[in-house]
Image (spheres, helix red, strand yellow):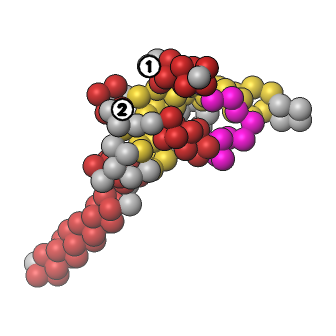
C-alpha cells in the first residue's frame, strides 16, 4: 500500500512539473506578457500559412493574415494584411512605429507585400502624401 502511495505521489509531482514547465514556455503566455509590458513580440506558426500571426508592439495587439502565392521559383507568402485587434490601443503610435512593424514582418516574409487595414491604412496614405 505504501509503494502505491509513493508511486502516485511521484506521478503527481511529475505531472505538476510538466504542467508548470508547459505553462512557462507557452507562446500565448509570452505574447500576453509582452502585451502587458508594451514590448514587441511576434507569435507565428511559420509552417502553417493558414494560421494568422499575432504581434504586439507598444501595448497594441495586431493580427496578420497570410496569403500564399508564387514567386519566381517557389511558393511563398506573397501577401499579408495586418489590422489592430482594438483601435483604442493605437493611441500614441506614430508612422515610425508602423514602419518598424512593417520591417519586422518583411524580415520574416521577404517576398510579401504588406498591406494595412483601416484606420492605419488611411494614416499611412495621409502621411505619405505630405
Taking the image as shown, residue 57 lies to the left or right of residue 71, namely left
In this view, the residue in front, 14 or 130, is 130
For the C terminus, give its image quadrant.
top right
> Residue at label 2?
90
**What is the x, y in percent for residue 4?**
16, 75
Which residue sits at x=61%, y=20%? Answer: 129
Taking the image as shown, residue 45 lies to the left or right of residue 92, namely right
**What is the x, y in percent for residue 41?**
45, 50
Which residue sits at x=29%, y=28%? Answer: 88
> Residue at label 1?
119
Q: What is the distance, in whole Å, between disc 2 and disc 1 at their CAs?
A: 10 Å
Which residue sits at x=16%, y=79%? Answer: 6
* Other-residue count near label 1 (Cα within 10 Å), few / some / many at <14 / 14–19 / ≥20: few
Mark 1: secondary structure: loop
Q: Looking at the image, which residue sits at the far front? A: 130
Which residue sits at x=23%, y=66%? Answer: 16
Q: Mark 2 and mark 1 in contact? Answer it, CB < 8 Å.
A: yes
**What is the x, y in percent for residue 30?**
37, 54
Q: Which residues are magenta?
A: 105-115
In this view, the residue in front, 87 or 70, is 87
**Does 125 sit above or below residue 25?**
above
Report the disc number at residue 58: none
Magenta stretch holds residue 111: yes
Magenta stretch holds residue 26: no
In this view, the residue in front, 37 or 126, is 126
Amino acid at each position: 500500500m505504501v509503494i502505491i502511495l509513493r508511486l502516485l505521489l511521484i506521478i503527481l509531482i511529475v505531472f505538476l512539473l510538466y504542467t508548470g514547465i508547459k505553462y512557462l514556455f507557452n507562446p500565448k503566455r509570452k505574447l500576453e506578457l509582452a502585451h502587458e509590458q508594451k514590448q514587441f513580440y511576434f507569435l507565428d506558426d511559420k509552417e502553417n500559412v493558414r494560421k494568422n500571426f499575432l504581434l504586439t508592439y507598444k501595448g497594441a495587439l495586431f493580427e496578420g493574415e497570410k496569403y500564399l502565392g508564387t514567386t519566381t521559383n517557389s511558393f511563398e507568402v506573397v501577401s499579408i494584411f495586418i489590422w489592430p485587434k482594438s483601435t483604442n490601443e493605437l493611441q500614441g503610435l506614430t508612422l515610425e512605429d508602423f514602419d518598424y512593424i512593417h520591417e519586422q514582418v518583411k524580415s520574416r516574409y521577404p517576398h510579401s507585400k504588406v498591406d494595412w487595414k483601416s484606420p492605419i491604412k488611411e494614416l499611412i496614405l495621409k502621411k505619405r502624401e505630405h
